[in-house]
């Protein structure tokens, strides 16, 4: 779009090429008006000049023919007939002097012929002058336009300078304000850190106040991302850890006092309640004793010892009470289960007293343990009568479903395999210098049982262990069957490659062995220090070979699961 410099109207410039007649930007209407004015001005200039005198006398026509190309121009002015009548008197004069010589006539004819040429020259001069005036006018208009543009430029430059000045002042004021705001914020950040460092952290209340002070939402917005953030976060973390430690120590002391008060009433507590107290003391209090002072650690150790003693006494008391109240097989069986638990727990306490090498505790737990064993033996004998034993089912230890339950040591050359229902054992290589070991019942932990077995010593000898505890040693009852000509500590000397059968019975502290090779042998009473529960093991020396053709058991009492 363009703006007319004459009327100010907005118009769409023509895309068609046209003759440039002005340096001004004009709309179509103003352009048409301007062209119309120029035509009128040109017409007015033409009518203002006297028209050339037409040829009136006949003699003058001859010279006129000498310039035929100039004649048409005077005839092109249609508005001049009236003015042409005025020069008529001039023509009349030569007519009245018809008697003049031919020289006068020739002069008049030449003058008439020169008139059109003069008019043409005047018109060209006028047109040239008109164009010059247009050019000057356009030049003046262009100069005015340039002056206006220059004026606008100066005005724009002045406005830009003014704006720049305003912006500079604004920026300067903004920068000063920003610097002041930063300084104020930094002062607030440092003040928060200084105030936090001054707060009391010697109590839980003080630590809680410090944590609340630092984590306050509005205050956190101030120090977040500041140079003081790292120090404040470190202070916050330390305070939280310190508070958690104080709370834990306070709670530990409180729990300890509660346990201590409860233990004072141990006589009214059950075995299960004292057992839970022991568990809590071991799992919750004892591990935290290192966080407390030495006196607290000593108090915890003493409480644990008192709790263990109370536990041992309560185990014994409840088992004895149950046995005294039992008046039938079911009651005595239930009491025997309590004695079983008492045996298992007391032997742990007794072993622990030896590890700690505390003579007082060894005597205390040893006394309870021996008494429990003696009382348990009497009760077991009363429950496991021959008639009761005959009614219990057999479990075949060589059956297919029991085969995975045999556990063997990995030694070079030692092997075991099941062949047509029999277990064949071959000892390790002589270079192994160790005995092959295999066992069953480690999970069940047989305590009172009857074992029926049949075997053949194919080569050398082997040894059977009963109630295996944690190891094969002198604390486990055993029998040695040898087919050698000479053997150290052999229980039975047998013939090689001959089949033998036997029955082993363990009830309480007594056990018997009936072997087909000789008279029944009643063994000594099992010492209270011997293992009283466990699996059945077979020890096979190097190069030996044994074949077990039958092994079944009646488990009367056990500590584990089937």
Image (cartoon, helix red, strand yellow):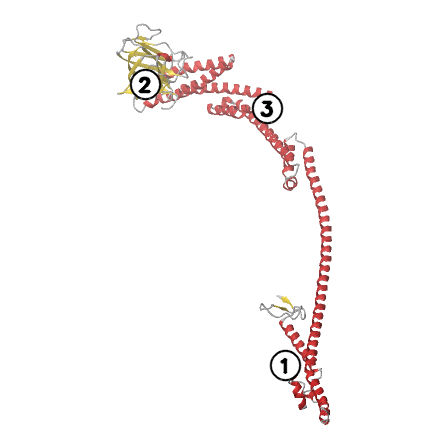
Q: Secondary structure at mark 3?
A: loop
Q: Quadrant of residue 213?
A: top right
Q: Quadrant of the N terminus?
A: bottom right
Q: Secondary structure at mark 2?
A: strand
Comes first in the chain, label 3 or label 2: 3
Mark count: 3
Q: Pointer 1: what residue? A: 69
Is 199 positioned to the left or the right of 460 in the image? right
Name the mark on residue 292. Answer: 3
Q: Quadrant of residue 233?
A: top right
Q: Residue at x 64, y 35 (%)?
A: 232
Gap in Å between the C-alphas at discs 1 and 2? Answer: 151 Å
Residue 436 placement (x, y as % from top left) = 36, 15
Image position of 522 with respect to 331: above or below: above
Residue occupying the far top of the picture: 486
Comes first in the chain, label 3 or label 1: 1
Image position of 76 with respect to 97: above or below: above
Mark 3 or 1: the one toward you:
1
- Disc 1: CA contacts within 10 A as few (<14), some (14-19) or many (>=20): few
Residue 180 placement (x, y as % from top left) = 72, 44
Asked whether 100 or 97 is in front, the reply is 100
Asked whether 123 or 546 is in front, the reply is 123
Is 219 positioned to the left or the right of 314 in the image? right
Residue 340 placement (x, y as % from top left) = 41, 19
Q: Secondary structure at mark 1?
A: loop
Q: Pointer 2: what residue? A: 416
Gap in Å between the C-alphas at discs 3 and 2? Answer: 56 Å
């Amino acid at each position: 779009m363009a703006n007319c410099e004459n009327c100010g109207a907005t118009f769409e410039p023509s895309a068609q090429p046209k003759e440039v007649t002005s340096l001004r930007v004009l709309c179509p209407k103003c352009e048409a008006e301007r062209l119309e004015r120029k035509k009128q001005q040109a017409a007015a200039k033409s009518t203002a000049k006297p028209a050339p005198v037409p040829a009136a006398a006949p003699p003058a026509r001859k010279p006129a023919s000498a310039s035929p190309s100039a004649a048409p121009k005077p005839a092109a002015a249609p508005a001049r007939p009236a003015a042409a009548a005025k020069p008529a008197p001039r023509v009349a004069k030569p007519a009245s002097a018809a008697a003049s010589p031919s020289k006068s006539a020739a002069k008049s004819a030449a003058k008439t012929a020169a008139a059109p040429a003069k008019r043409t020259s005047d018109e060209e001069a006028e047109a040239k002058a008109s164009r010059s005036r247009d050019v000057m006018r356009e030049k003046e208009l262009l100069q005015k336009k340039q002056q206006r543009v220059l004026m606008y430029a100066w005005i724009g430059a002045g406005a830009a300078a003014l704006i720049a000045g305003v912006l500079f002042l604004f920026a300067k004021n903004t920068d000063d304000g920003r610097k002041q705001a930063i300084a104020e914020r930094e002062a607030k950040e440092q003040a928060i850190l200084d105030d936090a460092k001054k707060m009391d952290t010697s109590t839980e209340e003080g630590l809680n106040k410090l944590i609340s002070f630092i984590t306050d939402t509005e205050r956190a917005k101030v120090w977040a991302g500041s140079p003081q953030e790292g120090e404040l976060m470190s202070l916050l973390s330390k305070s939280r850890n310190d508070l958690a430690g104080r709370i834990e120590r306070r709670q530990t002391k409180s729990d300890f006092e509660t346990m201590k008060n409860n233990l004072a009433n141990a006589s009214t507590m059950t075995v299960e309640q004292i057992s839970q107290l022991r568990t809590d003391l071991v799992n919750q209090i004892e591990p935290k004793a290192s966080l407390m002072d030495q006196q607290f650690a000593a108090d915890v150790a003493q409480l644990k010892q008192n709790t263990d003693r109370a536990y041992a006494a309560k185990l014994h008391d409840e088992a004895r009470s149950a046995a005294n109240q039992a008046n039938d097989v079911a009651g005595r069986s239930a009491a025997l289960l309590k004695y079983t638990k008492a045996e298992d727990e007391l032997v742990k306490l007794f072993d622990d007293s030896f590890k700690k090498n505390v003579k007082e505790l060894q005597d205390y737990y040893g006394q309870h343990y021996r008494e429990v064993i003696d009382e348990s033996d009497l009760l077991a004998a009363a429950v496991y009568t021959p008639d009761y034993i005959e009614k219990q089912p057999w479990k075949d230890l060589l059956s297919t479903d029991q085969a995975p339950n045999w556990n063997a040591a990995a030694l070079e050359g030692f092997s075991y395999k099941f062949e047509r229902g029999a277990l064949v054992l071959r000892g390790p290589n002589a270079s192994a210098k160790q005995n092959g070991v295999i066992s069953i019942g480690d999970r069940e932990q047989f305590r009172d049982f009857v074992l029926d077995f049949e075997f053949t010593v194919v080569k050398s000898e082997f040894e059977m262990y009963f109630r295996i505890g944690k190891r094969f040693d002198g604390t486990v009852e055993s029998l040695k069957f040898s087919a050698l000509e000479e053997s150290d500590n052999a229980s039975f000397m047998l013939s090689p490659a001959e089949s033998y059968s036997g029955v082993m019975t363990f009830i309480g502290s007594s056990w018997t062995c009936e072997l087909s090779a000789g008279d029944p042998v009643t063994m000594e009473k099992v010492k209270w220090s011997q293992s009283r529960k466990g699996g059945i093991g077979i020890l096979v020396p190097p190069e030996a070979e044994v074949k077990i053709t039958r092994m079944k058991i009646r488990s009367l009492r056990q500590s584990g699961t089937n």
